[in-house]
Image (cartoon, helix red, strand yellow):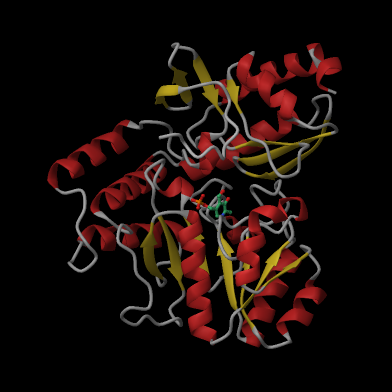
Amino acid sequence: MKLFDVYPLYDVEPVNAYGSIVIDKNDTEYLDLYGGHAVISIGHSHPHYVKKIKEQVEKIGFYSNAVQNSLQSKLADKLGKLSGYDNYQLFLCNSGAEANENALKLASFFTGKTRIVAFNNGFHGRTSAAVAATDNAKINAPLNKQQDVTFLPLNQIELVETELKKGDVCAVIIEPIQGVGGLNEGSTEFFTSLERLCNELGVVLILDEVQSGYGRSGKFFAHQFHSITPDIISIAKGMGNGFPVGGILIAPHIEPNYGMLGTTFGGNHLACAAALAVLEVIETEKLIDNARVLGDYFSALVSDLPGVRKVKGKGLMLGLEFDFEVSELRKKLIYDKHIFTGGAMNKNVLRILPPLTIGKREIDLFIKALQEVLVIEKSVIV
Ligand code: PLP
């Protein structure tokens, strides 16, 4: 059987990895500044994580949600403490798209309404509120017809107010820092007004922290830079460090009832063991502080490089906006310098999403490589 060919692939096959290093089948080492779309939070194959998963799989890997699983409560407790949301409720699932689908469904149940407000260049997975960028409309066309989603520009609160006042909106869904879209952010003033409007008009505010969460921004959740408290927070990516696990944190005023949400695989024993190990490492190795400090270090060094127009994002969720499209630059970084970076819908943005364990030495290596590629190859790239 052939694979359904939907991904353009780089000609590299990783077969091994540790920390921020990925090794391909020819034994070539790569510096990983992308973490497979921001998934690798505590570094590849972290010894504590490997140990916990091995120990768990030797006992039990999976049983259904129809029986008790105290690992789920352990995970909820630890997540509540580290994130500052210990009065919230946790529903576990398997991916970012699923987390957002459940968040939207819950908002619809809670309000009895169906329309969703999302934002231009936002990305919420292959969901009802999929992608807003017009050049990606083809990805979403069938879905957007099924669900009534209104896309608005960021930072224009009066447009949001007009939509919410129509009275048929169940949820506003927004990333605190846009990942796939290219690291655009709403201002604190925008987020606080959004929270106030949602509260006043009975609309559920969903913060999609699938990419920006789990310490990547330098706070546990990136929306905490704006001192807002959403009704629902969706999580995935860094949560399992590569093990597929996602979830939603749900405010206490949204009450559960049996059958409201459900999943076969969500919250299984192995996923919980992986997710718990991730939180333990984030805590003991102070990775949120590392994300903040190393993010500042990175941003300061990179901002003066030739062609860098702007450094966007926070902590270790960064985008370097160049004055040219970065696809050739990414190829040169991978094939010539053996460094993984990411692209974005904004074709001029190079995304940097390394493991939160990264150190200054790796950042220095990248800066040197980038300088060389930019200076030596500038005529080719630009
Ligand atoms: N939400 C955000 C902000 C994302 O960046 C992504 C994936 O890139 C998703 C949701 C979808 O996550 P998944 O691919 O796990 O379904």
Name the residue at the left extreme. Answer: 59
Is residue 129 shown to the viewer in this render? no
Would you place residue 82 above or below residue 216 in this image? Answer: below
| Percent x, y of residue 341 | 62, 30
| Frontmost residue, 366 versus 124 | 124
Please count the marks in the image. Answer: 0
* Quarter that holds the N terminus: top left
Residue at horizontal 61 percent and vertical 72 percent from the top: 147
Judging depth in this view, the residue of 229 and 337 nearest the camera is 337
Where does the image place residue 16, in percent across and percent down from the top left?
A: 39, 22
Which residue is painted at 35% across and 32% down in the image?
A: 46
Residue 279 in the image: state x and y as whole percent.
37, 48
Q: Does residue 37 appear in this view?
A: yes
User: What residue is rendered at 77% in x and 55% in y?
Assistant: 134
Residue 356 placed where, x, y %? 50, 37
Q: Based on the displayed image, in which of its 4 quarters is residue 123 positioned?
A: bottom right
The residue that appears at 67% across and 66% down in the rendered structure is 118
Rendered view: 108 above or below 143: below
Please identify the quarter of the rendering in which residue 228 is found.
bottom right
Q: Quadrant of the C terminus?
A: top right
Question: Residue 137, located in which quarter of the rendered image?
Answer: bottom right
The residue closer to the viewer here, 46 or 373, is 373
301 vs 176, nearest the viewer: 176
Q: Would residue 166 be found to the left or right of residue 317 on screen?
A: right
Q: Determine whether 340 is above or below 95 in the image.
A: above
